[in-house]
Image (tube, rainbow, N blue to C red):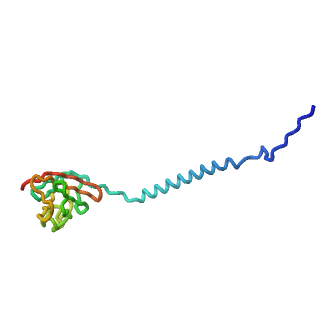
Amino acid sequence: MFPPVPRPRSPRRIDRPRFDRAFAPIAAVCLLLLVVVLGGGFAAIVTSAADPIDPAPTASLSVTVEESTVTLSHEGGDPIDVSDVRISVRVDGEALSEQPPVPFFSASGFEPGPTGAFNSAGTTTLSAGDRASFSIAGTNDPVPTPGATVEVRIDAGSTPVARLSTTATEA
């Protein structure tokens, strides 16, 4: 019989290393690591550069209403700078047409001369044990009458500090 015929060799040599396939995964891993490290560094810079947000004060407050005089009592907790808060009052669910612009001395819809921290002529900080009051003028609407439900809301920016409710009484 005839001796076997040698088969022609492929143009590619078997002993030559094949870099074209192994290079892509290594490059992808290196690129992914670079993206992760740069992203982490960017996040660290952004979070450390941001100003921390001051929390709203935490305090225990109560409210009383005698006829048209609203008195806020600070029973404990953080002091409240009333120049940094907004106070809104509702009588039987209806907002006053004029809200108290604390601190103030004379304002539309209110009797002049509020007491305590609500008076701009004195200290505007309401601390534990302090009381502050203002009187709603007859020109404001609605004016609390005995038996009316009065709600007082105190906000520091967009953060609520207190939501208080009481029933108006006679003086």
Estimate the x, y position of residue 153 in percent, counting from the top left. 22, 55
Q: Quadrant of the N terminus?
A: top right
Would you place residue 17 above or below residue 72 in this image? above
Q: Specify the quadrant of the image occupied by residue 171.
A: bottom left
Outermost residue to the right = 1
Which residue is at a point 17% across and 51% down the rendered structure image?
A: 165
Which residue is at a point 54% across and 53% down the rendered structure image?
A: 35
Q: Specify the quadrant of the image occupied by residue 51.
A: bottom left
Outermost residue to the left = 171
Residue nearest the observer in this picture, 33 or 143: 143
Residue nearest the observer in this picture, 116 or 5: 5
Outermost residue to the top = 1
Left or right: residue 104 versus residue 53 is left
Q: What is the number of callouts on the image? A: 0
Estimate the x, y position of residue 166 in percent, counting from the top left. 15, 51
Would you place residue 26 above or below residue 109 in this image? above
Estimate the x, y position of residue 12 in percent, counting from the top left. 79, 47
Left or right: residue 160 versus residue 69 is right
Estimate the x, y position of residue 33 in percent, counting from the top left. 56, 51
Which residue is at a point 34% across and 57% down the rendered structure image?
A: 53
Would you place residue 80 above or below residue 4 in this image? below
Residue nearest the observer in this picture, 4 or 74: 4
Left or right: residue 58 versus residue 114 is right
